[in-house]
Amino acid sequence: MVSKPHKLHIYFFPMIASGHLIPMVDMARLFAQRGVKATIILTPFNAALFSKTIERDRELGLETSIRLINFPFAEVGMPEGCENLSSITSPEMFPKIFKATELLQQPLEKLLEEDRPDCLVADMYFPWATEVASKHGIPRLAFHGTGAYALCVHHVISQQEPYKNVESDSEVFTVPDLPDTITMTKRQLPDHIRDGTKNHMEKFIEKVTEAEMKSYGVLVNSFHELEPAYSEYYKEVVGRRTWHIGPVSLSNRDNEDKARRGNKTSIDEHECLSWLASKKPNSVLYVCFGSLSSFSTAQLLEIAMGLEASGQQFIWVVRKDKSKEKENEEWLPEAFEQRLEGRGIIIRGWAPQVLILDHESVGGFMTHCGWNSILEGVTAGVPMITWPHFAEQFYNEKLVTNILRVGVGVGAQEWCRWPDDCKIYVKKEDIEKAVAQLMDSEEAEETRSRAKALGAMAKKAVEKGGSSYSDLSAFLEELELNRN
Ligand code: UDP
């Protein structure tokens, strides 16, 4: 009798930052929904953020599980419990987290030895994963957390260095040879590129690129119709095998899944939904800047004043900055919340973002242009106000405002990782103007209908026969054929 082959078993190994953990857990769950045995490798603090969701999937019969590896607190000198990029409180902790990611190699290898999966999907932040996978005779897939468009812009900027032809930080240059005209200033580029010297980050990115070139290919959380020219460019010009399998956030099927996604929310989901239900369709602006960005007190004050002056209804998520926890709330104008009661809500901490975006009352999203947030806005069919801060967010802004034309920029000019380093503020008047333009202007209707059309495309992409569904099928078939 021929024995039935075991289910394809795939390991998912995310970077320890919410913007990477959340989509990779979604991705693992999506694979499990397609009949794969999915194992997610997490450190204990991060595992606790997802364990209920995974338990729920298992009750539904899906073969998703978590395997734990310990975070090397003592070895890197980090305080206990601080094992996620969003919990770091100072720039000095950043390299320690990076050091910790290198030390995860041995424990991962031990698990691979025990479980012998058929494939390893590992975050780009683990360049050593390609060699580890090859040592175990399995393919390594890379995951960047961003879309093909930003990967192409990054590729051209790092290969051709067009920013070297300008004379000042504010002079505009064009990123050459791309399917669209993308203009930037040097001030909007990551500091490791701007510096011109090969710092630690630059060298690390070189390792990442090398490991990606040797890997089996790249899984992209995006869908072909969103960035067709760039999905081709990444394959043909950059030269990688890619599969567009997103938006992976659509693996969250109901409100319970959406409300629990990625962290414990700082607002009761029912309270949030009933507040939204009391508002007219498309009338609320959702303001959130992801899991890492934070602002100085002066900048928060400008946001508060801009939102108040806009006259619009809003939900504003203000990330708790652990280093400033003891400070009082001087970032709010006097009696702000009393004055705006009923018109606006402030969520201090973590919001159920996808649940909010998917509500019909939400008609705009002010975002820092993290890729997950953009994709979640696109999927919900919500137009955006773009306010990039760092990472590849300035590239993403151009996709939203210039290529897809589903948003307006607030006028951010400066790439800035830490609020204390920012020299240029976005003023209350700029915020008020962008909000009016997005929510209440002549062109707002057209922008909204383009956003709605994209949202419909996103949902179609993951349905049976859709582009992402088919890309994932093709990938799984190939793995099935090639496995030992
Ligand atoms: N997120 C959330 N609630 C929050 C803040 C963030 O659910 O209050 C989620 C958001 O939905 C997204 C992720 O955290 O999935 C943030 O990823 P993104 O790429 O947008 O930005 P990053 O945090 O990496 O800068």
Image (cartoon, rainbow, N blue to C red):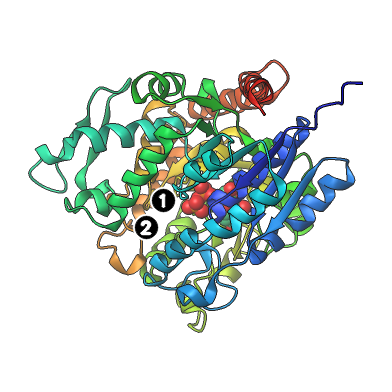
Residue type beneath disc 2: Lys
Image quadrant in which the C terminus is located: top right
Image quadrant in which the N terminus is located: top right
| Quarter of the image where one finds residue 380 | top right
At horizontal 48% and vertical 82% (from top left) the residue drawn is 327
At horizontal 14% and vertical 41% (from top left) the residue drawn is 171
Residue placed most toward the observer, 248 or 104: 104
Provide residue 387's location: percent of width, then percent of height: 40, 48
Circle 2 Cα neighbour tier, 10 Å, few/some/many (<14 / 14–19 / ≥20):
many
Provide residue 298's location: percent of width, then percent of height: 36, 69
Residue type beneath disc 1: Glu
Callout 2 touching callout 1 (CB < 8 Å): yes
In the visual, does 361 lie left or right of 268? left
Whether residue 116 is visible: yes
Decide: is 18 above or below 217.
below
Mark 2 and ligand 1: say if the CB distance to the nearest ligand atom is below 8 Å: no
What residue is shown with label 2? 428
Residue placed most toward the observer, 393 or 481: 481
Decide: is 337 above or below 118.
below
The Cα–Cα distance between marks 2 and 1, rounded to whole angstroms, is 6 Å
SS at badge 1: helix
SS at badge 2: helix
Residue placed most toward the observer, 327 or 117: 117
Which of the labelled discs sits on residue 182, or is there none?
none
In the visual, does 66 lie left or right of 89? right
Provide residue 55's location: percent of width, then percent of height: 82, 52
Provide residue 52's location: percent of width, then percent of height: 79, 56
Decide: is 24 above or below 149.
below
What residue is shown with label 1? 432
Residue sitting farthest toward the left = 167
Residue sitting farthest toward the front = 1
Residue placed most toward the observer, 60 or 431: 60
